[in-house]
Amino acid sequence: MNGTPLLEARDLKKHYPVTQGLALQKIVGWVRAVDGVSFSIHPGETLSLVGESGAGKTTVARAVLLLEALSGGQLLFEGRDVGQFGRAELKEYRSNVQAVFQDPWGSMDPRMRVKSIIAEPLVVNSTMDKQEIKRKVLDLLAQVGLRADQAELYPHEFSGGQRQRIAVARALALNPRLVVLDEPVSALDVSIRAQIMNLLKDIQATHELSYLMIAHNLATVRYMSHAVAIMYLGEIVEYADGDELFENPLHPYTKALISAALPTHPDDITEDIVLPGEMPSPLNPPRGCHFHPRCPAAMDICREVAPEVIHIRGVHQVSCHLYD
Amino acid sequence: MSAAQPLLQVEDLRTHFFTRRGVVKAVDGVSFSVMPGETLGIVGESGSGKTMTSLSLLRLVPQPGGRIVGGKILFDGVDLLQLSEAEMREYRGSKIAMILQDPMASLNPVYTVGEQVAEPLRQHQHLSGKALWDQVTEALRLLRIPSPRERLQNYPHQMSGGMRQRVVGGIAVSCLPKLIIADEPTTALDATIQAQYLAHLKDLQRQTNVAMIFVSHDFGIVGRMCDRVAVMYAGRIVETASVRDLFNNPQHPYTIGLVNSVPRLDRKVERLSSIEGQPPQLLNLPPGCRFAPRCYAVFDRCRVEEPPDFATSDDHAAACWRVAS
């Protein structure tokens, strides 16, 4: 991919201190929730972060939304270092980067009408007058497939899928460049998921919008993504274009994840890789490659030396000694 | 169907909720059967009645409000709906066991897991002493819990989510039931842990020949685990078929829509087809076929008359007028 990425993360780190004692808190260790993560998102594209709970994908998303202060590394927005931004630039960044969360029940004020929910970012951040805001809200409702008269209703009067449409409309209000999608369809029913995924794709095409998506359903990821990063214990272990990752997975963890992903058709069942054990605690990650205690292909070197990032072809990269 | 007797036969089951706003027909005329050792999947979206169906089988419909108003539940030839409450208790946890979605909610935080696995054995098999603890250890071993003897002393909070769900599985199998009802047993688990758990359940089934009912909204779980599938929509079963038949040759427009709206892992799909609209409110069902307002193949008869089941082969039936014609 050519051109400046819309958002670039360089060696992002987020470590949380673990403290002991009440008054004089002593730091006894660090949880390395995110430990050196790099990626870039290009305009009009979707990057998905995939991993199990505790892999650090939500922490990355929170860092991109500036809800977490970084312990290390840089975020570059259109080539400019977000860490150096002043007040005005930060405000602009926050307008440009919006979010849609998993739970359409928890992410809306039940006492606000839909029109106020969607208008809130405009009231806070724009100089539009009341009439312009009203027009914009109706336009947004139409974009997400809701009727104008539904603007007067409260969130509880909508189903889960419709609420997620409202959340999308709110995220689009400030014409953002990037939307963070945190499990956007996993709380929805199967027949509604396809509606919302198609809506997100349509909106992406019309606005040249970029998505940073967090998801654990690999079939959803394949449908939505241009690029995929597989995370394990705070690190990206494999990164590739969407199709490349699913057709030519390299890292044993990626292979196991794809195998563990339930088939969407009974004829899909190919090989069963059932990983032993569970993801270790990020407080005390194993030496060498973090994945080696569960890896079916672990070698001696994996127990001692952490693997480097190896570039395979194009953007495809993997951190695994099998490919040294 | 062969001459073998089904283990469970449900006929025209109706579970209704009586609310101030009217009668909610959560389960409205559901019939299916499960053979010994077989795994049946019940698939449906929220509100389709799949969980109420499984709770009805154990007569655990939420009170007040919910009531089983009609039908038969024949388990080994005995109609569970005719039993007294005391007789019913002999079945729960002993002959029919249940695994629920959230392992943290189904375990008691102030008892050790050993105590909790031991409880059904004390209750139903009146075991005690060494025999009891051997059986408890065996139940945990069946679910592949590492070093089960040491784990008996643990409290639920000392275990991970996957391990807790295995304990719940251990409780379910402790009395060697003939039927396990698993209601979304892996939704709370991570992908690789889910794969482990499902593999253990399969393994368990091979060892004990227990029949299972898998309640899920996930076609993937059904595809991996089940022999036959019943698809539920708005309180009724709209299609029943063998797993392969259901995926390769779905008959009901709702099933067709569902199968086509799920993204594929093994190939790039440019655009998913989706089912427009929402499931109906159970308080206010449309006349005729419940799926008619969302159906792409709807015709006049669908809007007035509710379709009965039509068999398309020995082991495949769909409730749809289009299939009949």
Image (tube, grey):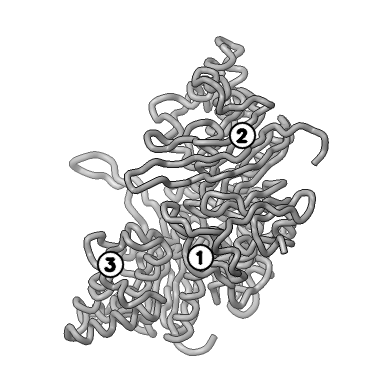
Q: Which residue is mark 2?
A: B180
Q: Is residue A138 visible?
A: yes
Percent x, y of residue B223:
67, 53
Residue lying furthest right:
B3
Q: CA distance from mark 2 to mark 1?
A: 30 Å
Chain of the residue displaying label 2 = B
Q: Amino acid at mark 2?
A: Ile
Q: Are marks 3 and 2 in contact (CB under 8 Å)?
A: no
Q: Which residue is mark 3?
A: A153
Q: Residue at x 41, y 76 (%)?
A: A145
Q: Are marks 2 and 1 in contact (CB under 8 Å)?
A: no
Query: Judging from the image, what secondary structure is the residue with disc 1 in?
Result: helix
Percent x, y of residue B51:
51, 43
Q: Give whichever of discs 3 and 1 has the lower sequence position.
A: 3
Q: Crowding near pointer 2: few (<14 within 10 Å), some, many (20+)?
A: many
Closer to the camera, A318 or B44?
B44
Q: Is residue B263 visible?
A: no
Q: Amino acid at mark 3?
A: Leu
Query: Judging from the image, what secondary structure is the residue with disc 3 in?
Result: loop
Q: Which residue is mark 1?
A: A193
Q: What is the quadrant of the N terminus of chain B in the image? A: top right
- Please state if B100 lies on the left or on the right of A261 as rendered: left
Chain of the residue displaying label 1 = A
